[in-house]
Image (cartoon, rainbow, N blue to C red):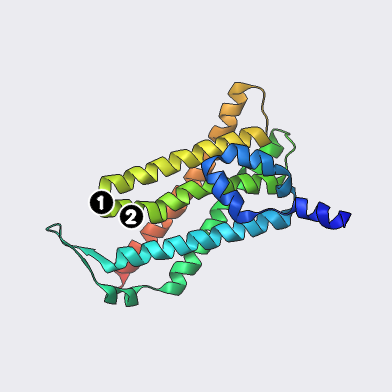
Amino acid sequence: MKNEKKKSKNELNFFEYLLQAFIKPFEEFKKTEKEFSDQKNTFILGGIVVAILTALKLISTIINTVRVTSLLGGTKWVVENIKNINFIKTIGGSAISYALVMLAIAGVYYLASLVIKKETNFFKLMGASITAFIPVAVSTTLVSTLLSMISLKLGVAGVIIGFIYSLLILIELINYLIPIENKNTKIYFHLTCLSLLFLTGAFIGYKIVVGSITSAIGSL
């Protein structure tokens, strides 16, 4: 009985955590921090987040595909356009992308912590990465799509707010997990890690866009 009670205390209520972490991320993460030492909890939470975000991305893709806006500003819904969606590519690509982004954030900060000789737990960093990634992912999928139906500017604003919220969460959680006393060192630490992440992401995005354009020209 004691073992069962001990085990139940170590179990993470994943969906409750996601809801609470979206509203009060730092407080919820700090309260649940020890649970992320168990890699099983981290991977399960990551899997749930990837699944939810992939579903939101699919919904967003369907809405954007069937909602057709004319040059004159008129909007109509063409349900038949669903057949143009490559569901395997959309689902698979989204799931892989979300998983890689969260792993990349945790991986870069973990390697950086080793460089400055600050001991930290990779799976706790993964928990922080997952927690911080949720707002920007939700805002770039469902929220931006819904707000764009009202106004394109609102859709862009939703993405920007989600991105800023995620960035603030990430910085606060990393500061908690990797305490750096010197303020200047802390600034350079985040500058290095975030620059590496953004530049790598921009480079990959650029390669994908250029590759798509090249393929399109080659097929003409």
Q: Is residue 203 visible?
A: no
Residue underneath mark 1:
150
Question: Measured along the vertical axis of the image, is residue 74 above or below residue 152?
Answer: below
**Front residue of this view, candidates 220 and 16:** 16
Instruction: Give the residue type at disc 2.
Output: Leu
Relative to 44, is 205 on the left or the right? left
- Structural crowding at the residue carrying mark 2, measured as other residues with C-alpha within 10 Å and reported as few (<14), some (14–19) or many (≥20): some
- Structural crowding at the residue carrying mark 1, measured as other residues with C-alpha within 10 Å and reported as few (<14), some (14–19) or many (≥20): few
Q: Residue at x 41, y 59 (%)?
A: 208
Instruction: Compute the Cα span from label 1 to label 2.
Output: 7 Å
Q: Residue at x 73, y 54 (%)?
A: 11
Q: Residue at x 49, y 59 (%)?
A: 53
**Front residue of this view, candidates 22 and 207:** 22
Residue 204 percent across, percent down from the top left: 46, 54
- What is the tally of numbered marks visible in this picture? 2
Disc 2, SS: helix
Res 129 label:
none
Q: Quadrant of residue 2?
A: bottom right
Which quadrant of the rendered structure holds the N terminus? bottom right
Instruction: Give the residue type at disc 1.
Output: Ile
Q: Residue furthest right?
A: 2
Q: Are marks 1 and 2 in contact (CB under 8 Å)?
A: yes
Residue underneath mark 2:
146
Residue 96 percent across, percent down from the top left: 53, 62
Q: Residue at x 31, y 51 (%)?
A: 147
